[in-house]
Image: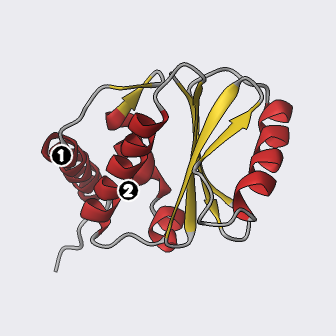
Amino acid sequence: MIHFILLISRHGKIRLSKYFSTFSNSEREKMQKEIKSMVIGRNSKLCNFLEFRDMILVAKRYASLYFVTAIDKEENELLTLDVVHFFVELLDKYFKNVCELDIIFNFHKAYYILDEMVVAGYMLETSKKQIIRLISNQDEIMEEAREEAVPRKNN
């Protein structure tokens, strides 16, 4: 099971956090602080898997973001690394060469993608086409709602 997913900038800012297990806010903040110190200063040639409390952290850096996933010790780390890569590929496909600013200004879309992919800590959807189609449908619904909310000027 995936306990949480964090996207952390090189400067230690949390850009996205999704929790699938219950943690109090103070516990989340404490864990995030510990994880940032463990992951950010780490040499890129070292292993992507770290032991953290009763979990395993799977961390991978893509461009200026660290993607950190916490899983049970019994889970497959390589499969989790593949899930992280799949998420990055989806973000890249949706945003057309994703960057940190895309996540900052369109965080709700990144959450939509993650929510379509992972439910209750388990990966359910493995089709990129299906996820992109669902997100595109969501965008169309949002655009229609925006158009209806803005009154048109009559000339």
Q: Is residue 149 visible?
A: no
Residue at the image position 63 percent from the left and 39 percent from the top: 57
Label 2, residues with CA under 10 Å away: few <14, some 14-19, many ≥20: some
| Mark 2 residue type | Val
Q: Which residue is label 2 attached to?
A: 88
| The quadrant where residue 29 appears | top right
Q: Position of residue 116 (x, y in %)?
A: 32, 35
Residue at the image position 77 percent from the left and 28 percent from the top: 53
**106 relative position to 45: left or right:** left
Q: Is residue 153 above or below residue 84?
A: below
Residue at the image position 67 percent from the left and 70 percent from the top: 10
What SS does tag 1 mark?
helix
- Residues tagged 2 and 1 counted as in contact (Cβ below 8 A): no
Q: Is residue 127 above or below residue 144?
A: above
Label 1, residues with CA under 10 Å away: few <14, some 14-19, many ≥20: few
Residue at the image position 54 percent from the left and 19 percent from the top: 74
- Quarter placement of the C terminus: bottom left
Mark 2 / mark 1, whichever is N-terminal = 2
What SS does tag 2 mark?
helix
Q: Which residue is label 1 attached to?
A: 137
| Mark 1 residue type | Asn
